[in-house]
Amino acid sequence: MIELFSFQFTYLEFGFFLCVPFLIGMAKTGIHGAGMAAVPLLALVFGGRLSSGIMLPILCIADIFAVAYYNRHANWTHLGKLFPWAAGGVILGTYVGGKIDDEAFRMIMAVIIFVSLAIMVWREKSTNQHIPQGIWFAALLGVLGGFTTMVGNLAGSVMALYLLSMRLPKNEFIGTAAWFFMIVNLFKIPFHVFAWETITLDSFLLDLTSIPAVALGAFVGITIVKKIPEQYYRWFIIATTALAALMMVL
């Protein structure tokens, strides 16, 4: 057994825990599906709701790496449309998250990811490449993104759907997502501390031990993204989203 800051792990559980910040570091620097793959791993160790509180500070650490590298590529027009609705989604997720069990949450998230994935594929294969301009689209995806990131740190597919629909280039896609999640994740912290009580001093100290793994994952993610041609990156995002959705179901 391994004991850290009042947490006890088997060697396998600790291995899972170390994989999570590495995957999150990769996700924040462009390997989109890696972040969703990290969610079930952490849930295996800590359970559903507690794992979301354990993961949030790791996400915030990874957000800093992503914003530091991609900050100049952010599209603030789209961010301005999304933020108010995402804040409402976080508040809604705080309420609903206290009412559902882990199994119901897992199935809801899987359905959301699969629906998002189907829409992504349909838009990529459609000859009609109209970009949704109505405020309804930003409102719907903003609320859904805020809700899913609060309940299970799984808004990656929702934001991928919005940003892919806007036809953003690779680096602008990553930079816009990086800023969106850094601001929204910071907004979520008080709800985890005071409403759900899933972030404590011990859990925060445990999260600080993950910084080297986050840094390594961020480096690997940046390196991989550089090697992916622009025309293939959109399908890469779709493929990693599909893999993460399958992991949620299985």
Image (spheres, rainbow, N blue to C red):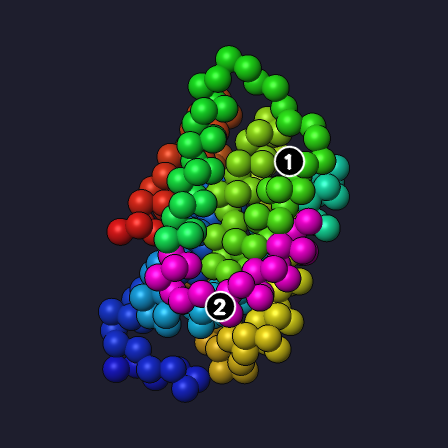
- Amino acid type shown at disc 2: Lys
Callout 1 environment at 10 Å: few (<14), some (14 to 19), or many (20+)? Answer: some
State yes or no: residue 98 in magenta: yes
Which region of the structure is painted magenta?
85-106
Q: Quadrant of residue 138?
A: top right
Q: Is residue 143 visible?
A: yes
Q: How many marks?
A: 2
Tell which of 210 and 46 is nearer to you: 46
Mark 2 element type: loop
- In the rendered view of the protein, which quadrant contains the N terminus? bottom left
Q: CA distance from mark 2 to mark 1?
A: 27 Å
User: Which residue is the site of mark 2?
Assistant: 99
203 vs 180, left or right, is left
Q: Quadrant of residue 73?
A: top right
Residue drawn at (48%, 17%), measured in percent from left and top?
126
Callout 2 environment at 10 Å: few (<14), some (14 to 19), or many (20+)? Answer: few
Q: Main secondary structure of the magenta part?
A: helix
Residue drawn at (60%, 42%), measured in percent from left and top?
141
Instruction: Give x and y (percent) for residue 185.
Output: 61, 59
Q: Is residue 68 visible?
A: no
Instruction: Give x and y (percent) for residue 10.
Output: 25, 76
Tell which of 108 and 21 is nearer to you: 108
User: Which residue is the site of mark 1?
Assistant: 137
Say which label, 2 or 1, has the lower sequence index. Answer: 2
Residue drawn at (43%, 84%), measured in percent from left and top?
5
Mark 1 element type: helix
- Amino acid type shown at disc 1: Phe
State yes or no: residue 88 in magenta: yes
The reply to whether the C-beta atoms of the residues labelled 2 and 1 are less than 8 Å apart is no
220 vs 249, left or right, is right
Tell which of 235 and 134 is nearer to you: 134
Instruction: Give x and y (percent) for residue 170.
Output: 55, 32
